[in-house]
Amino acid sequence: MLTLTNNDITLQQSASDKTTAIKAIAKQLADKGLVAEQYVKGMLNREKQNSTFLGNGIAIPHGTTDTRDLVNKTGVAVHHFPEGVNWGDGNIAYVVIGIAAKSEEHLGILKQLTKVLSADDVEDKLKQATTKDDIIKLLNGDVQFEADFSPALIQLNFPASDMIQMSAVAGGLLKNSGNVENQFVAELVTKDATHLGNGLWLVSGEKGVKRSGMSILTTSETCEFNGFPVKALIAVAACNSSHSPFLNIISQLVFEQQQAKIFSSSVEQLLAIFTVSTPQTIVDGDNVETFKINNAHGLHARPSAMLVAAVKKYKSVVKVANIDGDNKFVDAKSLMKVIGLGVRHGDSLQFIAEGPDAKEALAGIAEAIASGLSEG
């Protein structure tokens, strides 16, 4: 995994246009010995093929596939433009990340960077950053914008027979994922969970929390607590406000008396529920398709952009997950989030669509992927 250092960050830069910015970054990559001087041509040619602007004030200029032999060592040069650079089509870049990568190494870099940069308020924080450490912390994910929720934090049909056991296992999932310490688990088992109705329960804690996150546990046994049935327990670990969207979704489910969606859904469906803004876009499993990516270099910037463009043709909400990656569903209409999946050659993507043209959307996605997403 790429480790950013102060030597990778250049603050207080200015450029009249993106060509000037790219040339400056290419020169730094060359000065650091990461690329040959001719690599700049590949970066400019890539920009002519397709804009490397990702959104949220971020651009990632990099070379073409035929200039990879000019890369000596994988690395990046990050330039901070507090006044912004016009990247075309009305887009303004405040942070420009020049990438030098051999083979498919750049996908790992993109995944690491875009996973952090896709958060809604990163742009303002990066624009206002004043030190190299500020930018490094943001790019490394040390500043948490989204609470953690992944397949590792879901346990379905566990043979639990009482609430103490449920709380211990739910807390253990968060501990095993590195979100909490033993202190959190110890506190959780002493707390009385809150009944949200219809067998759904909620418990939370703040002690010993390193990263905010949520775990979900369902039981396969007949279980009761305080005279009410127990079918599922949601455990929330909070050390910042990033868990708030999860609580909003839970509140909406309770308001609509849809608690059963928690303990009757698959892992994939639970991930979809909590990666959308409202429960109205929760899918029922009918419109789900999986496609294998055969692009030689995976989904780098250009084919990712083509995929997103194909999805945006439809009104339906479309989520996508890399089954061979972290299997977390993201918005298929967000270029940054799609690139952040880190899709390599041979990986399989699962799409879930919900809306008036869901079936047509999945058919269009299938056609776009089969065509090679502009790469044949």
Image: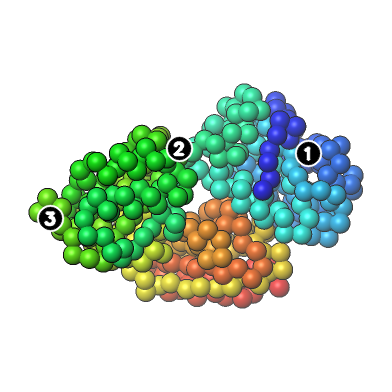
Which quadrant is the C terminus positioned in? bottom right
- Tell me: residue 247, above or below residue 301: above
Identify the residue at the far top of this view: 130
Q: Quadrant of residue 270?
A: bottom left
- The image shows residue 17 at horizontal and vertical percentages of 74, 37
Q: Earlier in the sequence, mark 1 or mark 2?
A: 1
Q: Quick one: SS at disc 3? A: strand
- What residue did someone put label 1 on? 25
Q: Quadrant of residue 57?
A: top right
- The image shows residue 282 at horizontal and vertical percentages of 34, 61
Q: Earlier in the sequence, mark 1 or mark 3?
A: 1
- The image shows residue 34 at horizontal and vertical percentages of 83, 44
- What residue did someone put label 3 on? 228
Residue found 48% across the figure and 58% down from its top: 328
Identify the residue at the far right of this view: 37
Residue found 18% across the figure and 49% down from its top: 195
- What residue did someone put label 2 on? 210
Q: Quick one: SS at disc 1? A: helix
- The image shows residue 226 at horizontal and vertical percentages of 12, 50
